Amino acid sequence: MKYCPSVWNFSRRPTREVVVGDPAHGGVVIGGAHSVVKQSMITCDTMDTAASVQQTLDLVAVGCQIVRITAPTVKDAANLENIVRELHARRCQVPIVADIHFKPEAAMEAVKWVEKVRVNPGNYADSKKFAVKEYTDDAYAEELKRIEEKFTPLVLEAKRLGRSLRIGTNHGSLSDRIMNRYGDSPLGMVESALEFARIARKHGFHNFVFSMKSSNPKVMIECYRLLVTRLEQEGPDWNYPLHLGVTEAGEGEDGRIKSAIGIGSLLCDGIGDTIRVSLTEDSPREIAVCNDLVAQIPLLANTQFKLAETPLSYDPFHYERRESAEADLGDVKAGGEQTVRVVVTQATFDKVAPKISPKADVKPEGIYEDLNVLELDPTQPLTIEQINCDTQLVTVAEGVALPPITAFRLLATKLAQLGRRNPILLKDCLVFEPVPLSPEIALLRAAVNIGSLLADGIGDAILVRGESGAGQSLRLAFNILQAAGCRSFKTDYVACPSCGRTLFNLQTVTARIKARTDHLKGVKIAIMGCIVNGPGEMADADFGYVGGAPNKINLYVGKKPVKFNIPEVEAVDRLVDLIKEHGKWVEAVAAEPATA
């Protein structure tokens, strides 16, 4: 199975065009030969027309090409008419997307006023109660008929009005029906979306895009790869564009790294036609990251060097870490069953070592110049004589004329062809820039290059050099490992980006929760503004803090709600109590003085 035209030579996945609005009057076209479209979502109450208009204008001012607005009720959906009218009065023609969950009647109202409607197959006509039920083929077919009855009216109205749709599945909100047949899996996400697409196609409607979102970048990557493959199997006219995003990525550096790994990896393989970077921050900041990320792809994908088409050495549809032998890094080992290690240059070590306490979690685990690293050029033939044992740490040589992702994939493939299991040291760059990169660009490049390879199962140690700041480069390396799910050195947070459904101030509450819990290494906490994606997206989190009603919070252990309607002023304290009850709490330790 192939998920892109070539993993070695960049080419954009060919798709049909999906029209969102009137391109002659502010609309956009997604797919085809058009550039990647950047979009975001406003965060205020949809019933607040003035705030909705202003936030939309603020997004457009920074280059947002499509704006999404939640419509949780028919009343909210009806108010989209007022929002759109006021935007047009302000001479703003940006396409508006109505975000629909649970209520088909809200979708039927919204489609009257906006250019695009997003539906989530997991909760548009289905339920999610984590119920276990066996479906016979006949019973399953009956359920599909019920779904078709619910979804067909929206399809017909969208076709009549010239609207577009987004069929957007979320890892956290697959229906019980899908979960019972396919499990909580990428295949379940794909099949859920295809069921809705078949209904649209049955009525001759093709103006739609797909999305497959997850808060886990590795899951998200696998889903899109599988979706593209399934679309190819369905036939050449199933070439629908794709909307990319890592949902609930969080804020700050962590949110940017997770998004860069998921979105950047796929863009470098030619997959993706429109993107949203979901940050728990003010929405206009998302567009700056979108712009920077899209601008890096021509530099990170192999657009210049023609390589032979060679089978990959790993399964791109199922994550499994590449098997390797162990190599000595001095005080620690890399490869085998060892965690992925962090290596630094001597210059970086000299700067950071005096500032690191003996018990620090973030510290160098190897100095590049001191290691016995074999540098190889994978564009040239490799021989057993060059690599005389499996315990030799290997990497791509400096100056190899390939982007890092392509170079390291090729190295792993050639090692497999020789039957070698050498541990691999990944680098974020193979050629130094003449001018130091800005921290924002260095972060994105390192996250895309190293994170993409880690998501493929390649890499036993990593070296970040594109970030010129010594301390920042060390921290960035650890943060990439955490975001890629390869290592846990701090508390992990899953935080949604806020929208009109949110029942508390996500930025403020996230900051409060982090202030109390950011010393809990290995604990994963989900912070969700509402229930839409909450339980499922929190399934692999230890604890969840979820808006249940205005100023009321529900607390979860995994996907199970355990405490309800807690006043918001008490909720963070009760979350801490819950963590203590389950034996996951430790007291924060004062920082030790640094030693040289």
Image: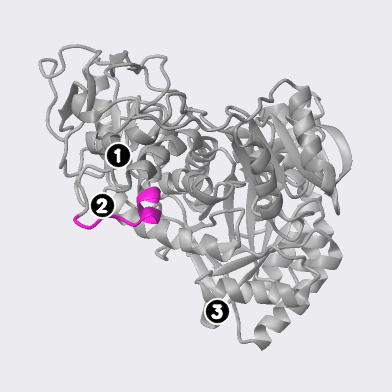
Up-down relation of residue 342 to residue 10 (above or below):
above
Q: At 35% across and 48% down in the image, what residue appears?
A: 445
**Label 2, residues with CA under 10 Å away: few <14, some 14-19, many ≥20:** some
Coordinates of residue 167 in the picture (x, y in percent):
64, 52
For marks 2 and 1 on the same chain, the one whose residue lies earlier in the sequence:
2
Name the foreground residue: 565 vs 104. Answer: 565
Up-down relation of residue 527 to residue 576 (above or below):
below
**Label 3, residues with CA under 10 Å away: few <14, some 14-19, many ≥20:** some
Is residue 401 on the magenta stretch? no
Which residue is disc 3 drawn over? 26
- The image quadrant where one finds the C terminus is top left
Which residue is disc 2 drawn over? 303
User: Mark 2 belongs to which amino acid?
Assistant: Thr
Which residue is disc 1 drawn over? 351
Q: CA distance from mark 2 to mark 1?
A: 36 Å
SS assignment at label 3: loop
- The image quadrant where one finds the N terminus is top left
Coordinates of residue 359 in the picture (x, y in percent):
46, 24
Report the span colored magenta.
Answer: 434-444
Coordinates of residue 256 in the picture (x, y in percent):
49, 50
